[in-house]
């Protein structure tokens, strides 16, 4: 599947913009602040019904405007699909596929896969566990509809359990009511836990392969799935922590606390990794995500490469371009501040290429 055309209205700094992409390499160049990253974000928006960077649609809408829209035409063999996302200042968001409005935005998830590699991704390493859970959940939700459903069930029950604990204001909760929450929370948690375990064991070898290949190194890297459910049954954990939960007025254990531990040569990456090693680690995570989508769906995702030649060194950029040349990827959209630099990197590649220059 590839994006043939993209039309934007009042999407961040783009008052009105139109792009006709080719099915292989597309390069968007222009000075800082010209809206290159915003175009990639618009493509991500069509796939995920939200921005990669900002969950608040009101901030995606161009300042002073009362609505925005992102319109895309996708082709997959002979099949064409038109996706239209709109948002108004009344807070109304609509997503349509071929003129038919989705009842639930979640029904759209998984139809179009994107892998977005941006300089902001180092937050996966530097920030808290929420970022890493989001990475895991995003990757799984794209390829497993049940995962998405069970995760939202888990979150809903958790919210109810937490508001009940809050309402009790530290008093002893009715055991029957707690049981009614826990008897639904535990099976949902167990399923998510199982899927996450399977995911890591499948994902890890790809990730390690890409890291070694990208950096031409034998350094060992690893992802370890950390969850309280590894050593104890969730029902026992909940029972053991009931007093703590009562005092804290929230559920202090569960798969909403899981993490992925990143390590390099057996040491925590965040503490011991150099800037370059951290960047490579993150790019390898994204390449493994690409591979995961490809293996699970049989389709090549759309690859969004933001500022790729600016932020990574020549060796790794060269390696990435090797992948491009090998026809590993389908459609790619690259951004760069320097048109000449990107043209130089791509000139030896025997692929279809289209260039777009944005104004300042
Ligand atoms: N809601 C909005 N309304 C209007 N402009 C916005 C909105 N949100 C972001 N912008 C503007 O979009 C511009 C940034 O666009 P973007 O990040 O895509 O630039 P870029 O070309 O990728 O720049 P760089 O080369 O620095 O990465 C900024 O000038 C920012 O102020
Ligand atoms: Mg940018």
Image (cartoon, rainbow, N blue to C red):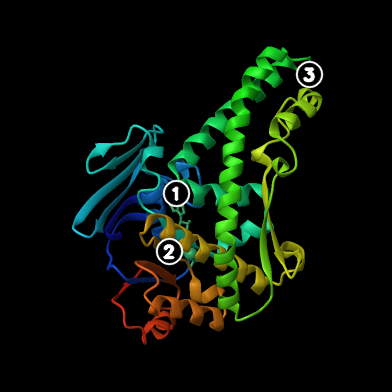
| Residue that extends furthest to the left in the rendered view of this protein | 78
> Residue at coordinates 39% horizontally, 69% vertically from top-left?
329
Question: Percent position (x, y) of residue 33?
Answer: 46, 64
Q: Residues within 10 Å of mark 1 (few under 14, many from 20)?
A: many
> Residue at coordinates 66% horizontally, 72% vertically from top-left?
277
The C terminus lies in quadrant: bottom left
Taking the image as shown, residue 268 lies to the left or right of residue 132, namely: right
> Residue at coordinates 78% horizontally, 14% vertically from top-left?
172
Residue 193 lies, with reference to residue 117, above or below; the image says above
Residue ID for mark 2: 304
Question: Percent position (x, y) of residue 346?
Answer: 39, 82
Tell me the element at label 3: loop
Residue 323 lies, with reference to residue 281, above or below; the image says below
Which of 94/303 is in front? 303
User: Taking the image as drawn, is residue 334 in sight?
Assistant: yes
Residue ID for mark 3: 170
Taking the image as shown, residue 155 lies to the left or right of residue 338, namely: right
Residue ID for mark 1: 142
Q: Are marks 2 and 3 in contact (CB under 8 Å)?
A: no
Q: How far apart are marks 1 and 3 (CA)?
A: 39 Å
- Mark 2 vs 3, N-terminal side: 3
């Amino acid at each position: 599947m590839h994006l043939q055309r993209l039309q934007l209205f009042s999407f961040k700094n783009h008052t009105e913009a139109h792009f006709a992409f080719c099915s292989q390499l597309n390069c968007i160049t222009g000075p800082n602040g010209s809206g290159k990253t915003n175009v990639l974000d618009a493509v991500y928006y069509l796939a995920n019904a939200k921005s990669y960077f900002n969950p608040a649609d009101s901030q995606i809408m161009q300042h002073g405007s009362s609505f925005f829209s992102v319109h895309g035409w996708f082709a997959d063999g002979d099949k064409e699909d038109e996706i239209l996302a709109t948002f108004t200042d009344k807070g109304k968001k609509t997503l349509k596929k071929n003129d038919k409005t989705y009842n639930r935005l979640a029904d759209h998830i998984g139809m179009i896969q994107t892998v977005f590699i941006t300089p902001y991704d180092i937050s996966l390493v530097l920030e808290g566990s929420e970022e890493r859970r989001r990475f895991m959940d995003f990757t799984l939700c794209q390829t497993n509809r049940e995962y998405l459903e069970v995760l939202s069930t888990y979150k809903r029950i958790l919210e109810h359990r937490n508001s009940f604990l809050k309402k009790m204001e530290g008093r002893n909760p009715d055991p029957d009511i707690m049981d009614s929450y826990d008897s639904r929370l535990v099976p949902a948690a167990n399923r998510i836990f199982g899927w996450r375990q399977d995911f890591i064991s499948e994902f890890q070898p790809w990730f390690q392969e890409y890291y070694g290949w990208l950096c031409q190194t034998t350094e060992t890297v690893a992802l370890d799935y950390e969850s309280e459910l590894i050593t104890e049954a969730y029902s026992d954990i909940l029972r053991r922590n009931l007093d703590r939960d009562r005092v804290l007025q929230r559920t202090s254990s569960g798969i909403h606390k899981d993490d992925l531990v990143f390590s390099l040569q057996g040491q925590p990456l965040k503490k011991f990794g150099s800037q370059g090693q951290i960047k490579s680690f993150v790019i390898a995570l994204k390449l493994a995500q690409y591979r995961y989508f490809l293996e699970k769906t049989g389709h090549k995702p759309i690859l969004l490469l933001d500022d790729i030649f600016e932020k990574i060194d020549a060796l790794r950029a060269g390696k990435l371009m090797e992948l491009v040349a090998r026809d590993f990827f389908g459609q790619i959209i690259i951004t760069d501040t320097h048109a000449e630099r990107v043209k130089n990197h791509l000139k030896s590649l025997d692929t279809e290429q289209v260039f777009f220059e944005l104004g300042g």
